Every structure is written in structure tokens, then in C-alpha cells.
Amino acid sequence: MTVALVINSGSSSLKYQVLDMVTCGVLGQGLIERIGEETADIAHRVGDARYESRGPIADHIAAFAAMMAAFAEHGPDIEGRRPSVVGHRVVHGGRRFDGPAIVTDRVERDIEELEPLAPLHNPANLEGIRAARTAFPDLPHVAVFDTAFHASIPEAAATYAIDREVAARHRVRRYGFHGTSHAYVANQTAAFLGRPIDEIDTIVLHIGNGASACAVRGGRSIDTSMGMTPLEGLVMGTRSGDIDPAVLVHLHHHAGMSFDELDDFLNRRSGLLGLAGSSDLRDVLRAADRGDADARLAIDVYVHRIRRYLGAYLVGLGGADAIAFTAGVGENAAPIRRLVVADLEWLGIELDAERNASPARGTRVISTDASRTAVLVVPTNEELEIAQQSLETAGISANGQAETGTDTHRRG
């Protein structure tokens, strides 16, 4: 059995998952929150069993010790079935990384040097990497970057129309995010339809509390809605998405808002929360059903933004073989899916109302048999994608045999 440990480290949290890479099944998983606070919350799951505890966890080194203690007490037996690789989610790889990379001291320094591009994420990701390398010094560690899948975006899509020297000096360009999810869903879509990935064009709509759209041509990203940061693009739970930059100047001059206040305003107090008073789309849908005008407008704005990107990507791809909905909203909110593709029969996109409303789980087609573009729901699995990329990069097959690894995708 080949086992992979996947780590997603936040500033005050540690999310982990242990996977059997032969069956792609989850052996165990957990979440440690409130690291560095007086009392941390620990939730560990093995199968259907859930174990919860609380206690002080000073830092990520201590969080790894707590994770290992949970494995020892509740399973799975991480010592008996020792991981072959540790995969790490890293949010921002800039232009330096166009794929996963074996973690070395040099790669750690590169991730640290990119912190100005993701000040809330990269430092936390790096904390997890360093803690994991301390806990598992004999294992290969692989950094998998959210931005890497979008390294294939052409310059016309990646370049903002500002002074080129200023942009180059401060690394201002479209990077895109949710790359592991977009890559996984695009591949799953092709496999489900029985088509080679290099022969299929897909629009992936990753719609959750964070949301982004991606145009994928032959397995390669050619455009995506998030930009230099995860703020640009679709309306999200608390993020505004696209906005006229002059609005910020206006609010600074006339509302007296500082740049820190504007950052908080756009990232944490906008989106569905700002429009309807809740960041949870389920609450907004229920309020709209009760006749709440603000909630109804919020849904209209939310759907309008998705449709705008959907139209742009249909043009960019010259039509699409498939549209794939994924993530929390995309997988579960049938009313949103219906509104997004409503009245698009003239484009060859025809939703089947019964299929769309079905409570079924798993990958499924929700368009009619006559629809030229297949519309699907494809559950994402970013942890599995990270694990698979990590094994490939480390040169290990799912059955544990050594292969030729890619080592690193560092571009200097």
C-alpha cells in the first residue's frame, strides 16, 4: 500500500488527510484550529468515527505532535503504514513555479520570498512545511501550488493594462488560484465523458465560499477569473470579486477609509455578506424564497457575474465540450446551476431539470441528451490531486514502485 499525507496549513490551523493511493480512499483526516491561542480545537476522523478534543497548541510543531498523537490513539497506524510522501498545499508560486516541486531549503526560501504576493497564506503554508519536515525528515516533501495550473495562461490574459515597468517590478499580473481543483475537475470530466484530456475543452465553475471560473483547453488553463489575488472575479461569500478600482479611490477620499480598511471591506465584508447579510448561500436562498428583496438581488448579482465569465470563456474557447460545476455551491445548489445556464439552448446548452434537481452524489451529467455541450456536476478532491501530483513529482507510483520524478518546476 502506498500512503500519502496531505497537509493544508493555515495561519492558525492545520488540515490533514491520509490517503491510500491504490484505492484513492481516505484512511484518516483531521483539522486542528486555533493554533497559538489559549485553547485549540482538534477534530480527527477515521471512517465514520469522529474524535474531538481541546487543549493548548502553541505552534505548528505542536500541532504536528497532536496530529501524530491522534493517529497513535485513534488510527490509522501512521507508523505501520508510513507515508511515502508528504504533499503540501501552497497558495502562491508566482511565476517561479509552473508545477509541483520537491521541497528543499532553496524551495523554502523561494516560498518565503513570494510572501508579499500572498501575505495571509504563504507564511502559514511555510510553517506547515517546516513543521512537517521536522516531523518526517526522511520523507520526500512536495509543494503543490494553487497558481501553477494557470502558468499556461497566455500573456494577453495574464497582463493588466498598466505601466509595464511598474508591473514587472512589483510582479503585478494575473496568477489565478484554485488550480488543483480546476486541474482535478478538468481531468475527471474528460475521464467521465470517455475523452482524452488533450481533446476536450472544459469550463470549470468552482463555486464555493471562494469561487473562480477557468477555461481549460486540452487540459491547460487558458484563462481564469481570479487575478493577482483571490479577490478578483466572481462574487464570493465575503469577497466582492470584480469592482471598478476607482471605487476604492472614492471610498478612500470621501468615506475616509484607509487601505487596511478597504482591504478588510472587500475581502471580509463584501460579496453575499455585504449584499444580503449572510455569507452562506443557503441562508440567502432561503431569504429570497421568503421574499427578501436584498437576498433576491444578491442572487441575481451572483448569477450575473458567473454568466458573464461563462460567456467570455465560451468565446475564448470557441465553444466548450463541457461545463463542470464543482465545490460546495456548484455541487449542491441546484437552483444556482439552473439559473447559470438558463435560456442557453441557442448556444447548444440545455439543462435537464430532473437530472439537475436530483439529490444524487458523485460525478453526473445534468444536461439533456440533446445538449451539444455537456453540463456536469463533478465533486472536487483537491487533497487527492495534491497527493497524486506529489507522488508523481517524488517519482513514486501508486503501488510504491520508484519511477522517474519531475523533481521541481522552478523557473528561477
Image (cartoon, grey):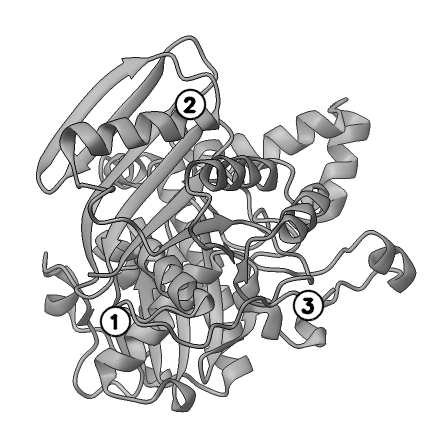
Would you identify the image quadrant in which residue 401 lies?
bottom left
Q: CA distance from mark 3 to mark 1?
A: 28 Å
Q: Point out the frontmost of discs 2 and 1.
A: 2
Observer-side mark, 3 or 2, equals 2
- Residue 318 % position (x, y): 50, 88
Distance of label 3 from label 2 (alpha carbons)? 40 Å
- Name the residue type under label 3: Ala
Q: At numbered mark 2, what does the secondary structure look like: helix, strand or loop?
A: helix
* Pointers 3 and 1 in contact (C-beta within 8 Å): no
Q: Do we see residue 224 in this rendering?
A: no
Task: Kindly check if marks 3 and 2 are in contact, taking CB atoms under 8 A apart as contact.
Answer: no
Left or right: 90 as drawn, with respect to 69: right
Residue 305 appears in the figure: yes
Secondary structure of the residue carrying tag 1 is: strand
* Marked residue nearer the N-terminal end (3 or 2): 2
Residue 36: x %, y % from top left: 48, 17
Instruction: Kindly identify the residue that appears in the image at 54 percent across and 35 percent down.
Output: 127
Which mark, residue 62? 2
Measured in 3D between alpha carbons, the distance from the residue under mark 2 to the one under mark 1, in whole angstroms, is 42 Å
Residue, disc 1:
376
Q: Amino acid at mark 2?
A: Ala
Q: Nearer the viewer, residue 373 or 146?
A: 146
The answer to which of 300 and 266 lies nearer the viewer is 266
Q: Judging from the image, what secondary structure is the residue with disc 3 in?
A: helix
Q: Amino acid at mark 1?
A: Leu
Residue at (20, 45) in percent of width and height: 80
Which label is found at residue 158? 3
**Where does the image place residue 350, in percent across and percent down from the top left?**
25, 78
Whichever of labels 2 and 1 marks the residue nearer the N terminus, that label is: 2
